[in-house]
Every structure is written in C-alpha cells, then in structure tokens.
Image (tube, rainbow, N blue to C red):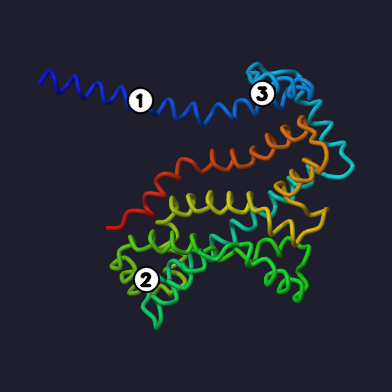
Amino acid sequence: MHDELKAEAIWRFAGYGFLILVTMFMLVPIYWLLVASTLPESAIIASAGSGLPRLIPGTHFLENARTLAARPDVDFYLSIFNSVLIAVVYTGLALIFCSMAGFAFAKYDFRFKEPLFLGILATLIIPINLLVVPLFLLVSNIGLANSYWAVILPWAAYPIGIFFMRQSMQSIPDSLLEAARMDGASEFQLYYRVALPTMKSSMAALAVILFLFQWNLFLWPLVVLQQEKFTIPVAITKIMGQEQIAYDQLLIAAVLAIVPMFVVFLALQRHFVRGILAGAVKE
C-alpha cells in the first residue's frame, strides 16, 4: 500500500513537471516577444547577435508604436480596424450558417444527406492555394473585389464549423424537439428557440475557432484586397520589406496583432473547453 502511494506520488510529480516544462516552452517565446517590443532596434539586433535573448523590458514601447504609425507605406492601425471588422462580421455570419447546417444534418432526414455531408467534409482536402484563382474570377465578376465581403463570404459556410455543430446538435434529445412541435413551434423556432439556447458553449468554442481562422488568413486577403483594406497578416509582410527589416516595428506590430485574439479567447475561454468536449463526445 505504501509503495503504491509512493509510485502514485512520483507519477503525479512527473506529470506536473512535464506540464510546467511544456508551459514554459510555450510562454517563453511570447515573453521574449513582449520584451523585445519594448527595446530599440539596436538593442534587439545586439541581443539576437549575442545568442542570449534579453529578458528585462526596455522603455521604447511607445516610441516603437509611434515609429510604426509614421510609416508612409503601411497604415498598420487601419489594418487592425480592417481585421477586427472582417473577423467579427465573419464570425457572426459563419456561426449562423454553420449552426443552421449542423442542425439540419443532425436532426432531419432528407435525400442525399450523407453524400452531401461527406462532400462538405471532402472540401477540407482542397488547399486554399488551388481556390484562389477561381474565387478571384468569381468575386471580380460579381463586383466584390477589394471589398470586405470578398474576404468574408467565400468561407462563411466553413466545413469544420458545420461538422462541429452537427456533432454538438446530435446531443439534443429528439423528445425535446417533438415536445416543442406539439406545442406549435415551427421548424425555425425549433432551431432558434430550442437548439441554439442549449448550444451556447459549442457556439462560443466555434466562435473562437472561426475568429482565429479569419484573423490569420493571409493569401486570400493579399490577392483580393488593395492597400487601404489590408488585414494584419498582409500588413506585417509589408512591414518586413524586401531589402531591410525594421525589427522594432515588426515586433511591436506582432504584439499588437495578438491583442484582439487574446481578448476574444479570454472573453470566451470559460465556454471553450466545455464546448470543445460537447462537440467531441456524443451520447
């Protein structure tokens, strides 16, 4: 008995040690990024050249931010506004489309249901690079090129979102929907008044996934948007330049780029794990 308790304590200690090591492995680069964004460019280059990253913050955070704002070729703060606007509208629209499609696939029987669902999942194996040219011709022909809608609409019915909501909505008891039908609820009211209120955690988890997907999208905004509507990933590549990299501006831009993602995750993290598990576990 004593040996079993001792072995359990050793395994628990090893588990905590491994988790602490992984956490440090994940957080140290982020901490270095935050520290480097507060240093002048000469200190950043000297720190990188010495092989020993500096871990004490400097005092040039605001100076680096002002230098970034003064760039004539890239309006980075406008790109933050563009990214926030696009990501928020996209997330709301994609949540509606994915939840409605997930509800239909989970709770209705219709012809070609399984082939349609498999067809949607099959689109995941198509690289975005292959879709760029036909999508660009499509949005150009309907007059959406260089507009926010050109970035939002092509991915509004996101296959992973449809799959996730289908798995989650399968946990809604059919008896609950039948009871609502007997009370006179329409099919849309079943979705809006019965299904959605029980799926708050799954919707919150999917909102985080959709926001991050749109926030990090690079190639398609680069192709379809012009400079005044550039998003953050595209603006950061412009900051890097082709001949000389302004490291102080690049690092402060990277820090500012992760702030909205951090805010969204903090706002929804209480529901995130619960929602992911709801989509992964089916009764």
**CB under 8 Å between discs 1 and 3:** no
The local secondary structure at tag 1 comes to helix
Quadrant for the N terminus in the image: top left
**CB under 8 Å between discs 2 and 1:** no
The quadrant holding residue 113 is bottom left
Task: Name the residue at 64% across, 53% down.
Answer: 217
> Please, what is the three-letter code of the amino acid marked with disc 1?
Tyr
Would you call the spot at circle 2 few (<14 residues within 10 Å), some (14-19), or many (20 or more)? some
Side of 51 relative to 205 (left or right): right
Separation (CA) of disc 1 from disc 3: 27 Å
Residue that badge 1 annotates: 16
Whichever of callouts 1 and 3 sits on the residue coming sooner in the sequence is 1
Asked if one can make out residue 194 in the rendered structure from this viewpoint, the answer is no
Residue that badge 2 annotates: 107
The quadrant holding residue 126 is bottom right
The local secondary structure at tag 3 comes to helix
Q: Nearer the viewer, residue 239 or 199?
A: 239
- Image coords of residue 178 (percent x, y): 31, 71
- Image coords of residue 198 (percent x, y): 40, 56
Task: Name the residue at 48% across, 70% down.
Answer: 120
- Image coords of residue 40 (percent x, y): 78, 22
Whichever of callouts 2 and 1 sits on the residue coming sooner in the sequence is 1
> Please, what is the three-letter code of the amino acid marked with disc 3?
Val
- The residue mark sitting in front, 3 or 2, is 3
Side of 204 relative to 49 (left or right): left
